[in-house]
Image (cartoon, helix red, strand yellow):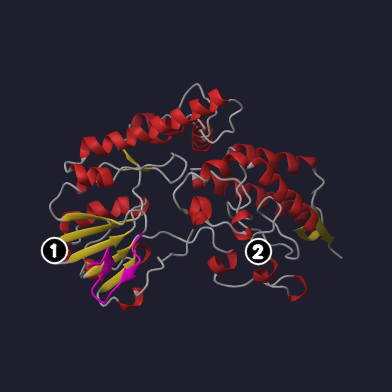
Amino acid sequence: MHKAKLPGIEGIELFEGKAFHTTRWDYDYTGGSPTESMDHLRDKVVGIIGTGATSVQVVPQLARTAKEVYVFQRTPSAVGVRAQMPIDAEWFRSLPAGWQQERMRNFTEVVTGNTEEVDQVGDGWTAAMRVDTQTIPTTDEQRAELESIDFEVMEGFRRRVDEVIEDKETAEKLKPWYGKHCKRLCFHDEYLQAFNLPNVHLVDTDGRGVREMSAAGPIVDGKEFPLDLLIFASGFEVTTGLVDRLGFDPVGRDDVLLSERWHDGTHSLHGVITAEFPNLFVVSFIQAGFGLNFVHFLSESANHITWLIKHCLTQGIASIEATVEAEDEWLQTLWKRSGAIAQYNKTCTPSYGNSEGARTMLAARGAVYPGSLLAYAALLDDWRNAGTLEGTRVVLEN
């Protein structure tokens, strides 16, 4: 996730005020810095499109200094208590070597429903995700139990809105009515509170998003909102084609382009290697494992790719790639095991988690390995330990 995404708003190019994406923040315009107040906004009317994880962090900062802040919302985030607190220095110094890896492992175990005796992290994530409600129920009773658990978790987020927001109409619009796995949960102690300030205004689009823009600003339900500054907190390209996100088109054997080979979506073994592109190693959760702690996923991916490279070097292998047959078999494995997630995602509002609701082969090939990231890592470990490089085509050095 590195390529900024702009919303597809009709007339977006017409806006004559200042505009930027949150990844390209212009401190020359806003003043301040990541640690200092944005004092240039004191006479500015500011709009922000998006209410996801980025906006949750940005809105409170804008509220402190901007003359007026308009928050344009498609779907409200579920925002829990962050409960930020200082780390005890003595406790930190007492941690044994390797504590980071163990803490990541423990977190992933807990948030994917694998009960641990001790929750080492103990934050909102582990509390909300301790039971995996995406599991395929085997009985009507289990289905009802999972739905009840999921509902109660989200009801806690909705109760917090009522506890914090003073205006009841605004509170209703800020309540998240979807399952806990549908969108990334957020935890912040100032976001909801910002909507109690007189200079902060929620513009709810009833799930439609901003669809029209004029030279002056966004238009919602026929009403124009003139702005000095428009900020796009609209996230990143996640499920679009790899070539689009790379910014270049890799060339494989016989001059085949990756955009041609992957015209209908990802073709891979384990989400890492692909046919006709020797020694191309991909780091992406598409057709691979996924974890709420992205650093843990990156660590497991790096371990696997490092092993592949080292193995090839020590065994005199000049190149390695997937076979087409292995790619097809891997995709079938993903599809067969993804039934519970697919059924759950059908109930979700549009997001990158369900490819914005798209029903295409591109979206279908964007499947993620179901279950725990640790289960995916164990699968890779078993594959490596087998020592046969099953599903690959290798070329030995001359």
Q: Which residue is mark 2?
A: 264
Q: Main secondary structure of the magenta part?
A: loop
Q: Are marks 1 and 2 in contact (CB under 8 Å)?
A: no
> Does the rendering let one see residue 343?
yes
Amino acid type at circle 2 is Asp
Of badges 1 and 2, the one in the foreground is 2
Residue at position x 33%, y 53% from top? 206
Residue kind at label 1, given as amino acid type = Arg
Mark 2 Cα-neighbour bin, 10 Å: few <14, some 14–19, many ≥20: some
Q: Is residue 266 above or below residue 371?
A: below
Q: What are the residue bounds of the magenta stretch?
A: 209-223
Q: CA distance from mark 1 to mark 2?
A: 49 Å
Q: What is the residue that sits farthest to the top in this orientation?
A: 117
According to the picture, the residue beneath numbered tag 1 turns out to be: 42
Q: Eyeballing the image, is 302 above or below 82?
A: below
In the rendered image, which quarter contains the C terminus? bottom right
Residue 18 percent coordinates (x, y): 26, 73
Residue name at image x 44 percent, y 39 percent: 179
The quarter holding residue 393 reads: bottom right
- The numbered mark, 1 or 2, whose residue comes first in the sequence reads 1
Q: Residues within 10 Å of mark 1 (few under 14, many from 20)?
A: some
Q: Is residue 15 left or right of residue 98?
A: left
Picture coordinates of residue 128, whole percent (x, y)? 42, 33
